[in-house]
Image: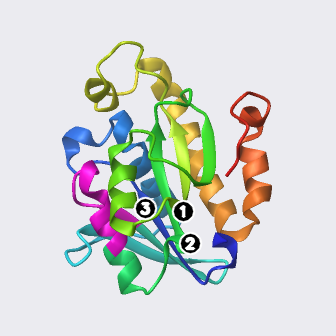
């Protein structure tokens, strides 16, 4: 479990470039960037990893925050290179990604599972050869008939922007808990609303 690991790699998914910075598909970037800002650490470009990386200590653990510099569908390259460099496995990886299947503002934690059509997760699973890695899913809501690409690369609505800061903060708090607390305790708390619904799996 992550909370027992000495090293933790947290990868936020998104697309590089200012034009994508505030799009729905970059929600993973936003959460990891907010984590770094809160901890007062800066990202540096690491060409070897094809990513920007910020490292810090949380509760005596070495935490590496990673923002892939490839586009979304090649995110797996950075994940694989960082894990290999630090001699870590997918058991020490947390991926933060947007999720169309969840309403905007809802979080969900899973230990394994399919990519669910998410190109970043597909790339990671292809690169690592496993679906066994922890992911924090951040709901962006259904596209409601809007073409998938247009929706995920679109910007948040005015109403969503009002809630975005708090939503991102919740994501950061969830990551901090995952680093230090038992996974099932955190999942039972974060996924509470899902547990009350038909989508009641937490792993």
Residue 6 sits in quarter: bottom right
Tell me the element at label 3.
Answer: strand
Q: Which residue is drawn at 48% across and 82% down?
A: 88
Image position, residue 181 (x, y; %)? 75, 66
User: Is residue 180 shown left or right of residue 95?
Assistant: right
Front of the two marks 2 and 3? 2
Q: Earlier in the sequence, mark 1 or mark 3?
A: 3
Please report contact status of discs 1 and 2: CB closer than 8 Å, yes or no: yes
User: How far is disc 2 from disc 3 in space, using C-alphas?
Assistant: 13 Å
Q: Mark 2 points at which residue?
A: 91
Q: Nearer the viewer, residue 84 or 11?
A: 84
Residue 71 included in the magenta stretch of the image: yes
Image position, residue 47 (x, y; %)? 19, 75
Q: Residues within 10 Å of mark 1 (few under 14, many from 20)?
A: some
Front of the two marks 1 and 2? 1
Residue 150 sits in quarter: top left
Q: Residue 11 carries which label?
A: 3
Tell me the element at label 1.
Answer: strand
Magenta stretch, main secondary structure class = helix
Tell me the element at label 2.
Answer: helix
Q: Name the residue under label 1.
A: 132
Q: Earlier in the sequence, mark 2 or mark 3?
A: 3
Image position, residue 12 (x, y; %)? 41, 56
Compared with 63, 87 (above or below) is below
User: How far is disc 1 from disc 3 in space, using C-alphas?
Assistant: 15 Å
User: How far is disc 1 from disc 2 in space, using C-alphas?
Assistant: 7 Å
Image position, residue 7 (x, y; %)? 55, 81
Residue numbers of the magenta segment: 66-80
Q: Residue at x 77, y 36 (%)?
A: 195
Viewport quadrant of the N terminus? bottom right
Q: Which of marks 1 and 2 is nearer the N terminus?
A: 2
């Amino acid at each position: 479990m992550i909370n027992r690991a000495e090293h933790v790699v947290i990868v936020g998914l998104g697309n590089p470039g200012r034009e994508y910075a505030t799009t729905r598909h970059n929600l993973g970037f936003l959460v990891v960037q907010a984590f770094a800002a809160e901890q007062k650490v800066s990202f540096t470009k690491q060409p070897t990893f094809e990513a920007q990386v910020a490292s810090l200590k949380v509760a005596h653990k070495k935490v590496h925050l990673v923002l892939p510099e490839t586009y979304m569908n090649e995110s797996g390259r950075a994940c694989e290179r960082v894990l290999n460099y630090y001699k870590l496995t997918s058991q020490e990886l947390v991926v933060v990604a947007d999720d169309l299947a969840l309403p905007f503002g809802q979080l969900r934690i899973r230990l394994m599972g399919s990519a669910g059509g998410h190109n970043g997760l597909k790339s990671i699973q292809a690169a690592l050869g496993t679906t066994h890695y922890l992911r924090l899913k951040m709901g962006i809501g259904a596209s409601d008939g809007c073409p998938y690409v247009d929706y995920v690369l679109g910007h948040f609505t005015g109403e969503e922007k009002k809630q975005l800061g708090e939503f991102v903060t919740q994501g950061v708090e969830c990551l901090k808990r995952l680093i230090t607390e038992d996974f099932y305790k955190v999942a039972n708390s974060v996924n509470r609303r899902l547990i009350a619904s038909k989508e009641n799996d937490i792993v």
